[in-house]
Image (cartoon, helix red, strand yellow):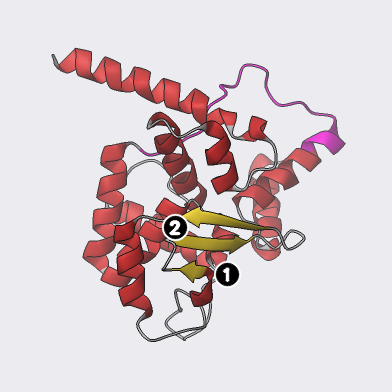
């Protein structure tokens, strides 16, 4: 009989060596399940994990407390909802300060989308960039590009410093912000475009999560009244 611990080590090695991001690892497991003739459990909930508003605030506060540059980097990752592979590829010229936009090229056939940013984030990024016109938007300490794995480590370290007990990873920030936008009334089709989903069915999960989030807030308010 196979040893689950040893099998887990082999799978982890494949994911590390392949430098898979969250979407890539999900797709890999999906293919593996299909080849093994396995189906996902029928009773799983149609929602995604995310951080609460309080956890999100603590996370960003911890990032800025550690270092202003780290704070801006993780704030940008959160608010743009980029996949970690897209985030590490961002260049200075991908930010349109005049239009409050970040242009994302996802590398899949040269597809391009525009992600709006707030005036506040725009100003902070403008100060960060200074006189640079080209190069990585966020340079690594060595002056190059961050790896996806390093960003994952930074997110994990920051969550620990913030005292957040749940597992926090870059894609969780994407889930968190997307759910917040839907909760705030942003049309699901607009959220789809910002996230870069080809099919709206993939985006509807945030609507389900938003409904659950409202229920949780209601119950919390009732219990404290």
Q: What residue is rendered at 48% in x and 53% in y?
A: 170
Label 1, secondary structure: give it. loop
Q: CA distance from mark 2 to mark 1?
A: 12 Å
**Is 1 contained in the magenta span?**
no
Q: Can you give x and y, in whole percent of width and height, for residue 121 in the image?
A: 33, 61
Q: Residues within 10 Å of mark 1 (few under 14, many from 20)?
A: many
Checking the image for residue 152, the label placed there is: none
**Front-lying residue, 78 or 181:** 181
Judged left or right of residue 209, residue 165 is: left
Left or right of 90 in this view: 222: left
Q: Residues within 10 Å of mark 2 (few under 14, many from 20)?
A: many
Instruction: Tell me if residue 85 comes above or below residue 213 in the rendering.
Output: below
Question: Which of the 4 image quarters holds residue 188?
Answer: top right
Residue 189 at x, y = what percent? 58, 35
**Residue 30 appears left or right of 64:** right
The furthest residue to the left: 225
Q: Quick one: which residue is furthest to the front in this view?
A: 98
Question: Which residues make up the magenta segment?
Answer: 33-51
Q: Is residue 176 above or below residue 94?
A: above
Secondary element under disc 2, as helix, strand or loop, is helix
The residue sitting at 70% across, 53% down in the picture is 10
Q: The N terminus appears in which quarter of the rendering?
A: top right
Q: Nearer the viewer, residue 107 or 168?
A: 107
Q: Kindly identify the residue that appears in the image at 86 percent across and 38 percent down.
A: 35
Check residue 77 in the rendering and tell me which mark sits there, or answer none.
2
In percent of width and height, residue 190 lies at 54, 39
- Circle 1 residue: 89
Is 214 positioned to the left or the right of 224 in the image? right
Q: Main secondary structure of the magenta part?
A: loop
């Amino acid at each position: 009989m196979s040893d689950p611990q040893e099998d887990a080590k082999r799978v982890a090695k494949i994911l590390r060596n392949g430098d898979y991001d969250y979407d890539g690892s999900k797709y890999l497991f999906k293919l593996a399940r299909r080849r093994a003739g396995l189906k996902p459990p029928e009773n799983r909930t149609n929602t995604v994990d995310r951080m609460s508003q309080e956890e999100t605030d603590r996370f960003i506060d911890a990032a800025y407390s550690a270092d202003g540059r780290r704070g801006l980097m993780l704030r940008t990752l959160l608010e743009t909802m980029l996949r970690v592979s897209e985030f590490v590829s961002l260049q200075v010229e991908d930010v349109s300060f005049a239009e409050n936009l970040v242009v994302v090229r996802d590398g899949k056939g040269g597809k391009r989308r525009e992600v709006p940013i707030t005036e506040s984030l725009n100003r902070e990024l403008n100060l960060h960039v200074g006189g640079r016109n080209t190069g990585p938007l966020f340079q690594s300490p060595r002056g190059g590009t961050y790896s996806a794995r390093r960003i994952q480590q930074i997110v994990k370290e920051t969550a620990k410093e913030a005292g957040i007990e749940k597992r926090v990873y870059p894609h969780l920030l994407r889930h968190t912000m997307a759910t917040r936008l839907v909760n705030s009334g942003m049309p699901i089709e607009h959220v789809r475009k910002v996230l870069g989903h080809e099919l709206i069915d993939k985006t509807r999960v945030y609507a389900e999560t938003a409904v659950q989030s409202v229920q949780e807030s209601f119950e919390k308010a009732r219990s404290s009244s």
